[in-house]
Image (tube, helix red, strand yellow):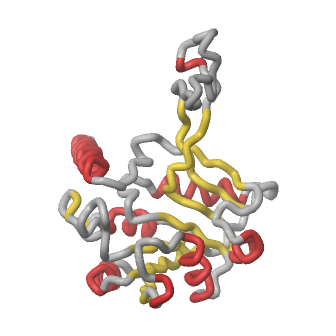
Amino acid sequence: MEIPKITALVPMKGHSERVPHKNVRPLMGKPAFHWIMETLSKSKYITEILVNTDSKEIADSARANFDKVKVLERPDFLLGDMVSIQPLIEYDIEQTSAEYFLQTHSTNPLLTVESVDGAIEAFFAQTEHDALFSVTEVKQRYYWPDGSGINHDPKHLIRTQDLEPIYHENSCFYIFSKETNHKIKSRLGSKALMYPINELEAADIDDMEDFYWAEFLLKRKLENNLSH
């Protein structure tokens, strides 16, 4: 199976509402965004990392520490907290000759290169789906506001481990082509393949509680690595 070169897209703002300076905030000895950059740098399929940012600090740190990086200075029309991801993707994919992309976030510090490369291999091993996105499996009871069960029958309770799983879009990564994004205008394409990853690996930093949780998990991971 021949896999084409992949460009990673990592959009990062200097400003963060809920976690001050989230992307450069020290996380287990390094700026938080370095964790995902190190993972992408180790991928055997990713040949370029586009960092779209409005922050000189992020841009300088990315250039100084990672070889595959190309920094894109965020244009004025994409500045601000209200800009959604699709306009950023549309801008970024025109700044490179690459045809295939993996978009991820600086807020997923526990994402592993094994999952990144495994997802890329899974995407190119099939032809039915025009995109791929990461998910986490959930086996818990959920309810609509009227009290009816979403994924179970409240009148016939079974063990949660026996429930049919539902899947949470964890926003860790998305794989798609330039052609698909031009056509569909979405990183999910028209028929995306779900790629499950471990719940702990999918930890996402959205608020301070998430930051402390990611810090704990990274500390535990590093300690385990040292003990083996």
Residue 225 at least partly seen: no
Residue name at image x 59 percent, y 40 percent: 167
Quadrant location, the C terminus:
top left
Q: Is residue 133 above or below residue 25?
A: above
Residue name at image x 36 percent, y 78 percent: 66
Residue 110 at least partly seen: yes
Query: In this image, 58 relative to 226: left or right?
Result: right
Q: Is residue 67 above or below residue 148?
A: below
Residue name at image x 44 percent, y 86 percent: 74
Quadrant location, the N terminus:
bottom right
Q: How many marks?
A: 0
Of residues 131 and 112, the one drawn nearer to the viewer in this rendering: 131
Residue 221, x across and y down, in percent: 29, 45
Single out the residue that lies furthest toward the right.
128
Q: Is residue 204 above or below residue 88?
A: above
Query: In this image, 200 relative to 148: left or right?
Result: left
Residue 4, x across and y down, in percent: 67, 73
Of residues 55 and 61, the one drawn nearer to the viewer in this rendering: 55
Single out the residue that lies furthest toward the top.
156
Residue 61, x across and y down, in percent: 28, 80
Quarter holding residue 27: bottom left
Of residues 106 and 88, the one drawn nearer to the viewer in this rendering: 88
Of residues 211 and 41, the one drawn nearer to the viewer in this rendering: 211
Query: In this image, 70 relative to 26: left or right?
Result: right
Residue name at image x 59 percent, y 18 percent: 162
